[in-house]
Image: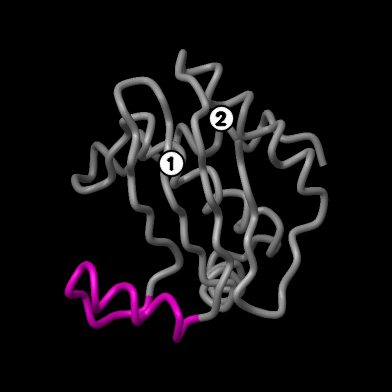
Amino acid sequence: MITFNYETNFKLDNESSTENWIQTIIDKHNCELGEINYIFCDDNYLHKLNVQFLQHDTLTDIISFDNSLGKLINGDIYISIERVEDNAKDFKVSFTEELHRVIIHGVLHYIGFKDKTEADQNEMTLQENLALKELKY
């Protein structure tokens, strides 16, 4: 089950098609969907979580708390809409594309992809790009 929660003045368009897309990506990696909660928030909200739980005094676009068990995918994914907006401008992509990249980024972490090393970052970007090609706008 996937739930979308809002702690800021934002509402995801097409929740059901986004949910189906996430399910497709999980299936393609031979994993099973448990429970994923998306929480869309602002910079201030996510910054507080970053300091409290990760001891990082920085802004970020996403924090994911992984509760997966083996191939059963579970977790809470917090996304700052303000960071996504700024990153979309910086990367010269649409807000929608950047939002979907961040949405699937958290799931890819739960599946097992990392992004700490350059090689891992390259693989993560490849997996994000492959997932985005699956998305039907």
Looking at the picture, the colour scheme in use is one colour
Please say if 85 is above or below 118. below
Q: Amino acid at mark 1?
A: Thr
Task: Answer whether residue 97 is magenta in the image.
Answer: no
Residue 44 spot, x, y in % from top left:
45, 86
Quadrant assignment for the N terminus:
top right
Name the residue furthest top.
30
**Residue that appears at 45% across and 80% down:** 45
**Residue that appears at 37% across and 20% down:** 71
The residue wearing badge 2 is 130
Magenta span: 43-59
Q: Nearer the viewer, residue 96 or 122?
A: 96
**Residue that appears at 41% across and 45% down:** 75
**Residue that appears at 78% across and 38% down:** 17
Q: Amino acid at mark 2?
A: Leu
The residue wearing badge 1 is 125
